[in-house]
Image (cartoon, rainbow, N blue to C red):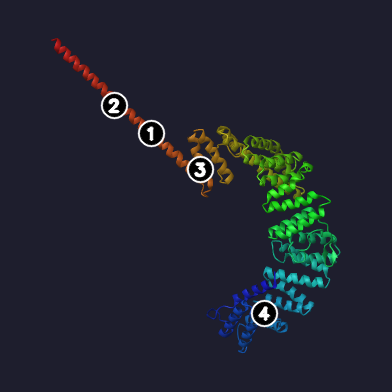
Amino acid sequence: MSLTKIRILSLIALTSLSLPPALQGDTPAKHSMAISQAQDLIQNHKWTEAETLLLKALETPLTEGQENFHFQLGLTQMNLRKNTEASSQFKLALGFGENLIDYSTFYMAQIAEKENDLNLAEKLYRDIGGYSPNIHLKIEAHKNLAKILLEKQDFKNARALLTPLEKQVRGGDESAPVILYQLALAEKGLKNQTSLCKWIRKLYTKFPTFERTSNWGTSLSVKAFEGEQTKCSMSEEDFKARTNKLISLGSEAKALIEIQAVRNELATQDPYLGDEHLARFYLQQGEALKALELLKVHLPKKQKNIEFLLNYAVAATRSGQNAAGVGAYYQAHLLAPRSSDGRRALYQAAFLSYQNQDYDGASRKFQEFVQKYGETMTVAKSKQFSSTKKNRRSNQTSSSSGVQKGLIKDAQWYLAWLKYLRGDYSGAYQSLSLTQTTAKNPRNSLRKSSPVNDRTRYWMAMSLLRMSRQDEALPIFENLAQDPLQGYYSLVARGRVKQIKLKSAAQRESLLDSQKQILAFQELLRAAQDDLEREKMTVSFGFTRSCQ
């Protein structure tokens, strides 16, 4: 944390203690107003004017609120580099209260350090820990204390102080690179080359823009660290991590310069490695076609290099050449079918075939994936739970098998979905049912709402609907529509419910109309028959009378 930020925090602390006169009873109105006006001047970097204002207010003797006033005056004089006067004001602030004891002590320690009184500075920095300071002030105090210990060549105690501090700042504190650099200095002083290189590599990969390491672009072992070569080896992965970090920080130009430098160094040794770094940069910048052109040159010689094939597949796919991407992924799978990369490559080949609307090819590859790795996942899981040793390795296995299990479920889903797309609604329904491990009754299965579960149930119901089995589909749609989270499939299911009910109502109305028409026709038929009978009787009666 910078000194400026520490001072801002101290001003915030002071402001929280210096309430407006109407709300504050421990500071006379004149002095309280002076503090407020001084803070306004300080915010505009008018330190001299702020000091003049506070000294004038001090002409009236302080009876209350002395701690706040002396602290503000000390902070102002410190920024004007009047160290002796500032230290006196901080001491006065300490004598009147403990609200600002941590900040007052911190600034007194800084003044002592500037005056080269390292013993006093060390004591004051150590004292701060007993005042329960906030985490930022604690980190800054320990960092400055470590600096003093390093200057005294007390490397062992410096390392003991910095090691836990390094863990505290891993979340992104801006003090992290400084602390790593100090740890490297401590290990160098202790002549511990292994630990020295550990911190050097961390600085190299995670903080490439740090001012003291920003020039460590290539050949880390010969770069200068405190006047001597680091003698720390650098792997390809270290360089990738460094350039990736540069890109993520928005320093693409610097990353490209370093990549080009490495490419030139590798031109005679291994041209592919240099081109691979540059192709990776182009991919990250969205220039996939440039990356593909670089890699295509090496394709004839790298047919059996799985890392190359995976990079080539990504470049081809992003360039819109899906067929080439599918082929590269599948070839990578064949080279290492048991590896994690090999498994993922087969899945990617299947998925790309699906995206390219090669449904037959996608079905074959997804089926191959499920057949090859469904049983493997089960065996790996059983081995994982049968052993309680080697926890770290077991956790890695758990994570790997979890990813694989997820891919198998996805592959099973796509197999069912491809059947639906090709009009095999009965097969799609059966395949979707198999993906439900808790299903005894498909209508009641997977009651717990989740995007995956909702998707499965929705398309099961759609398959039933396509087979004109509305009575079976309707309960599934209704169950989805009742989801309180109102997810996507809940909303579309609601529309399907309405559609089915309207259609059923229309069918019932149509049936009623048909029945009414039949009844009316029957009524007309009976009337016609009655008329016919009457006509027959009339004719018969008239014939009888004529005969008489």
Where residue 255 sits: x, y (%)?
73, 58
Disc 4 is placed on an element classified as helix
For the C terminus, the image quarter is top left
- The three-letter code of the residue at mark 2 reads Glu
Picture residue at 62% right of the left edge, 89% below the top: 59
Residue corresponding to mark 2: 523
> Which numbered disc flags the more N-terminal residue, 4 or 3?
4
Judged left or right of residue 298, residue 446 is: left
Q: Quadrant of residue 505?
A: top left
Disc 3 is placed on an element classified as helix
Residue corresponding to mark 3: 479
Please determine whether, in this image, residue 466 is positioned above or below residue 94. Answer: above
Where residue 3 sits: x, y (%)?
70, 73
Callouts 2 and 1 close, C-beta under 8 Å = no
Residue corresponding to mark 4: 75
Disc 2 is placed on an element classified as helix
Residue corresponding to mark 1: 510
Mark 1 burial class by Cα count in 10 Å: few <14, some 14-19, many 20+: few
In space, the residues marked 4 and 3 are separated at their CA atoms by 67 Å
Q: Is residue 340 visible?
A: no
- The three-letter code of the residue at mark 4 reads Leu
Q: Is residue 146 visible?
A: yes
